[in-house]
Image: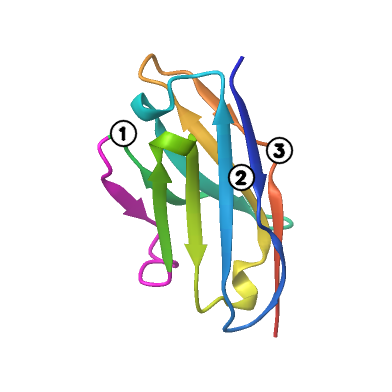
């Protein structure tokens, strides 16, 4: 059973930084692609950043240059470093694990609130 647990969310002022973590269990972490998604009130969930098993990364245009996704396979953890935060970054942030067989798993999310 794959489990994903996000942490690191909270309240921060605009211009500040947060680092989100997602700890995975129940799967061989290194072979999976990982991603961070977010959902703001009244909006659909969308991709923020993703990282493949080989370390290639992909970012939403709105966060490129401000956010950095990384992974530590030894700790079964993926991170999202968020700098220069803006009020429009306010959302619940979800971690997703994508297995090579096509199965995907979601965490329960962590709330990020950016005040102006």
- Chain part drawn in magenta: 54-66
**What distance separates the C-alpha of mark 2 from that of mark 1?**
18 Å
CB under 8 Å between discs 3 and 2? yes
In the rendered image, the residue lying farthest to the front is 74
Secondary element at image label 2: strand
Name the N-terminal-most of marks 2 and 1: 1
Q: Position of residue 96 (x, y in %)?
A: 53, 36
CB under 8 Å between discs 1 and 3? no
Pointer 3 residue: 108
Residue 113 versus residue 52 in the image, above or below: below
Pointer 2 residue: 94
**What distance separates the C-alpha of mark 1 from that of mark 3?**
22 Å
Compared across the picture, whether 26 is left or right of 100 comes to right
Name the N-terminal-most of marks 3 and 2: 2
Q: Position of residue 44 (x, y in %)?
A: 62, 48
How are the residues colored? rainbow
**Residues packed near mark 1 inside 10 Å, few (<14), some (14 to 19) or many (20 plus):** some
Q: Position of residue 51 (x, y in %)?
A: 36, 43
Q: Work out whether residue 21 or residue 102 is closer to the camera in this orientation and state it.
A: 21
Secondary element at image label 3: loop
């Amino acid at each position: 059973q794959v489990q994903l647990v996000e942490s690191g969310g909270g309240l921060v002022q605009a211009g500040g930084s947060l680092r989100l973590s997602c700890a995975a269990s129940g799967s061989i972490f290194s072979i999976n692609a990982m991603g961070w998604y977010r959902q703001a009130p009244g909006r659909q969930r969308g991709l923020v950043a993703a990282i493949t098993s080989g370390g290639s990364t992909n970012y939403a245009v709105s966060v490129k240059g401000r956010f950095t996704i990384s992974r530590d396979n030894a700790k079964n953890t993926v991170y999202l470093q968020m700098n220069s935060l803006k009020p429009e970054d306010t959302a619940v942030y979800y971690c997703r694990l994508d297995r090579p067989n096509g199965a995907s798993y979601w965490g329960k999310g962590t709330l990020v609130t950016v005040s102006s």
